[in-house]
Image (cartoon, grey):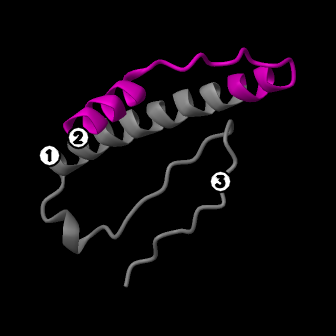
């Protein structure tokens, strides 16, 4: 039993060589990376903006139900957050 466990751990720890990107995959990977960078920027802006907003507004839960960011770079069909 112990030998099987050691063999299993050794098998999982064995590195597997990754194959190189194909010419067709390279632009897809680049687009995914760019979109991820934009998502990071939006998330950071929301974090900073929310912290600044909460410092200035008294009782925000009674006045705000949600908000949405917009960008000319990323089209969004995200639903609006109506109060209610």
In the image, is residue 27 part of the stretch drawn in magenta?
yes
Residue 33: give x, y in percent of width and height: 61, 26
- For the view shown, which residue lies furthest in the bottom direction? 84
Q: Pointers 1 and 2 in contact (CB under 8 A)?
A: yes
84 relative to 72 in the view: left or right: left
Where does label 1 land, which residue? Answer: 55
Residue drawn at x 30%, y 37% is: 4
Badge 3 element: loop
- For the view shown, which residue lies furthest in the right direction? 24
Residue drawn at x 13%, y 65% is: 59
Where does label 3 land, which residue? Answer: 76
User: What residue range appears in magenta?
Assistant: 1-30
Residue 67: give x, y in percent of width and height: 42, 59
Residue 14: give x, y in percent of width and height: 43, 20
Badge 1 element: helix
Front-most of residues 64 and 73: 73
**Disc 2 to disc 3, C-alpha distance:** 24 Å
Disc on the earlier residue, 2 or 3: 2
Residue drawn at x 55%, y 32% is: 36
Give residue 52's mark.
Answer: 2
Badge 2 element: helix
Give residue 2's mark.
Answer: none
């Amino acid at each position: 039993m112990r030998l099987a466990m050691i063999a299993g751990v050794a098998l999982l720890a064995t590195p597997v060589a990754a194959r190189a990107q194909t010419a067709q995959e390279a632009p897809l990977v680049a687009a995914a990376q760019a979109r991820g960078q934009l998502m990071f920027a939006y998330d950071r802006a929301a974090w900073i903006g929310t912290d600044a907003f909460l410092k200035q507004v008294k009782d925000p839960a009674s006045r705000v139900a949600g908000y949405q960011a917009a960008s000319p770079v990323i089209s969004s069909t995200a639903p609006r957050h109506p109060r209610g």
